[in-house]
Image (spheres, rainbow, N blue to C red):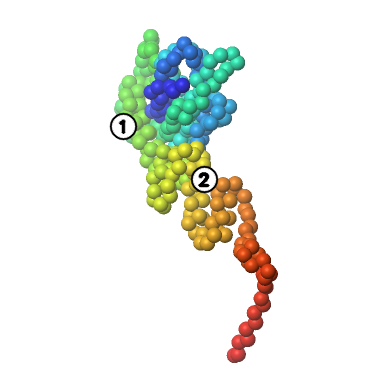
Amino acid sequence: MQLLDIKARPHSTGNRIDVTWVNPEPDSFSGVRVMRREGTHPTSPDNGILVVDDLTGERECSVVDKNLKGETVYYYSLFPFNGDPREYITDTRNRVSAMATASYDFAGQMMDLLPGIYHRYDTIPPGEPFPEGMYEEDKKRGQLRRFLDIPGSQLDQLYSFTKAMLHLYEVDRVDGNLLDLLGQWIGWDTDFTLEIARRRNELRNAPIWYKTVGAIPNVEATIKRVSGWESRTKEFVHNVFLSNRPERLNLWERQKNE
C-alpha cells in the first residue's frame, strides 16, 4: 500500500525534521511505523531507529523528529500495518529523506550587534495570556528579539546548506539522491534497483575497478566488490589446454660487465 504526499522538511529551529504523509486507507491500515537511519533507508520495520508508531488512524498524519545532528541527511521508511499481530507493508515508494540543519543563533548574533539602547527597551516580555504555540524561550524575550528570529532562522538554514556543500564529494556523506551525479562524473552507471548503501559501495570501489587491467585483476576486483573479501586467482590455461605439458618455472640469469 502506497502512502501519499510523503514529505520531510528541515525545521527552521535546527536539529529537527518534520515528516508528513497521507494515509489513503485509514480504515484498512490504522497505523504507520516510521523508521530512521543514516546513510541509507531502513529496509524493514525493525531496521534503524524507531521514530513513531502512529496509531491515530487519521488520514493526514505528521511526526516531529528532534535532537538530530546538523548537516546530516536522514533517511525515513514508512511501514503501514494492520491486524493483531501486526502485518507490515513494505513498499519502496514509502520512503523520504531530508538533511537536518543546525542552529547557529544568527538571531542572537544580530541582536548583540545592535546598540545598547535597543537592548534597554527590548526587555519587556509579552504579557499573559501568551499566544498559542509560543516557545518557552520566547516568553522571556522582547518583541525585537523575537522578530529577529524570523530572518535569523533562515540564515541558520542557509549557512547549514552552504556548509554541507563542502561534503558533496564524499561518497559516505552525500545525499543518496546525488550519487547518480557522482557516478556520471567518473563514467559509472548507477543501478537504481540497489539500496543506497550498495550504491555507495559501488562508487567507492569504482576507481579500483577502473585501475585493473586483465582478466585476473578484474575477477579479484569483482569478488571484492560483491563479497568484500580479498582473494587470490590463478589462471590455469596451461593446465587445461596443455594437459600433456606441465607448467615450467624458468630461472633466468643475466651478467652485467662494468
Q: Is residue 115 above or below residue 190?
A: above
> How would you rate the neighbour count of disc 2 (Cα within 10 Å): few for under 14, some for 14-19, many for 20 or more?
some
Left or right for 157, reference 258: left
Instruction: Report x, y in % for residue 79.
Output: 51, 23
Q: Residue at x 55, y 25 (%)?
A: 45
Residue in front for this viewpoint, 211 or 117: 211
Residue at 57 percent of width and 17 percent of height: 86
Residue 111 falls left or right of residue 173: left
Check disc 2 and give the amino acid type: Asn
Is residue 228 depicted above or below 154 in this figure?
A: below
* Percent of width and height locating residue 163: 40, 41
Instruction: Tell us which disc is closer to us: 2 or 1.
Output: 2
Of residues 253 and 20, the one drawn nearer to the viewer in this rendering: 253
Where is residue 171 drawn, in percent x and y?
47, 45
Please report contact status of discs 2 and 1: CB closer than 8 Å, yes or no.
no
Residue closer to the observer: 32 or 27:
27
**What is the spatial separation of the Cα atoms under label 2 and label 1, in whole angstroms?**
54 Å
Q: Residue furthest bottom?
A: 258
Q: Residue 201 got which mark?
A: 2
Q: Residue at x 52, y 31 (%)?
A: 42
Which residue type carries mark 1? Pro
SS for callout 2: helix
| Quadrant of the rendered image containing residue 109 | top left
| Marked residue nearer the N-terminal end (2 or 1) | 1
Can I make out residue 13 in this image? no
For this orientation, the residue located farthest to the front is 244
Q: Position of residue 88 (x, y in %)?
A: 54, 21
Q: Which residue is mark 1?
A: 115
Residue 192 to residue 76: above or below: below
Quick check: 153 left or right of 57?
A: left
Assess disc 1: are there few (<14), some (14-19) or many (≥20) residues with their C-alpha within 10 Å of its C-alpha. few
